[in-house]
Image: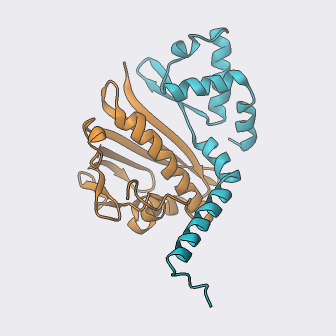
Amino acid sequence: MSMDEVFKALADPTRRQLLDRLYAKNGQTLNALCEEMEMTRQAVSKHLAILEEANLVITLRRGREKEHYLNAAPIAEIAERWIGKFERGRIEALADLKRRLEGTSDEQG
Amino acid sequence: MSKASFVYVNYIRTTPEKLWEALTDPEFNREYWMGATLETDWKKGSSWKLVFSDGRVADAGEILEIEPQKRIVLRWRNEFMPEFKADGYTRCTLEMERVDEMMKLTVLHEAEAEGPHKLIEEGVSRGWPRILSSLKTLLETGAALPGRKTAPGS
């Protein structure tokens, strides 16, 4: 599983649609996911395999059924890589402002 | 209708020892688990509770299975939000596995009974990704994500 696979998996509207559908309702079977998709069962299955390969979808066996779950971990990694730094900066700035307003800043000479 | 479930699979650049320590050491917990710590003796059949820094119990239950550096299975109930507590007990399985230079951490959190489940569908599904991505960042960089060190509503 690499970042390249994640981006490749996300670079397709059908696969994003499948992730959206799992986000709305997690744990769906292939049959359930095929509903409302205007393509063959094989095509949906192929897209799911690519998502699974990229760790974006996890499957669990439940008796005879296979359920599909959205795995947010690779997306969290993308967010942390390019957004985390800014989020950290903002929180630090707020903490700094709070310290100054409360007059406890030890930066004052 | 099947049981409400939540799955999160995370690959973390760390060792089995470090990952185990991060999950079971209260001082380590506090750094990434919204300021909360897991209190238990980590023995099969023992009770456990997740306690916020202000003393409130977030979640609690029993240790169903434990195998160091491999697997923890917890019976789990939310204790601090009435609408989640009403859903009753759930089961949370944490599995650790070395894959190349990484540790694969799988968290599977399921309802015990079938039917809609607010704790799994809302609480767990929102909470785990924040905690687990913070855990990953902490183990890989030594610093947890901001805003993950304080309890909600405190």
The picture quadrant where one finds residue A85 is bottom right
B22 vs B11, left or right, is left
Q: Quadrant of the C terminus of chain B?
A: bottom left
Q: In this picture, is B131 found above or below A1? A: below
Q: Nearer the viewer, residue A47 or A13?
A: A13
Who's the residue at 49% across and 25% down the image?
A25
Q: Nearer the viewer, residue B83 or A19?
A: B83
The picture quadrant where one finds residue A76 is top right
In the image, the chain rendered in cyan is: A
Q: In this picture, is B140 found above or below A35? A: below
B100 vs A64, left or right, is right
The picture quadrant where one finds residue B41 is bottom left
Q: Nearer the viewer, residue B26 or A76?
A: A76
What colouring does the structure picture have?
Answer: by chain
Task: Return the x and y of residue B117 as percentages of the image width and height.
Answer: 34, 31
In the image, the chain rendered in orange is: B
Q: Residue furthest bottom?
A: A109
Who's the residue at 29% across and 38% down the image?
B83
Task: Return the x and y of residue B21 as percentages of the image width and height.
Answer: 45, 63
Task: Return the x and y of residue A26 as percentages of the image width and height.
Answer: 49, 27
Who's the residue at 31% across and 25% down the image?
B114
Q: In this picture, is A74 found above or below B26? A: above
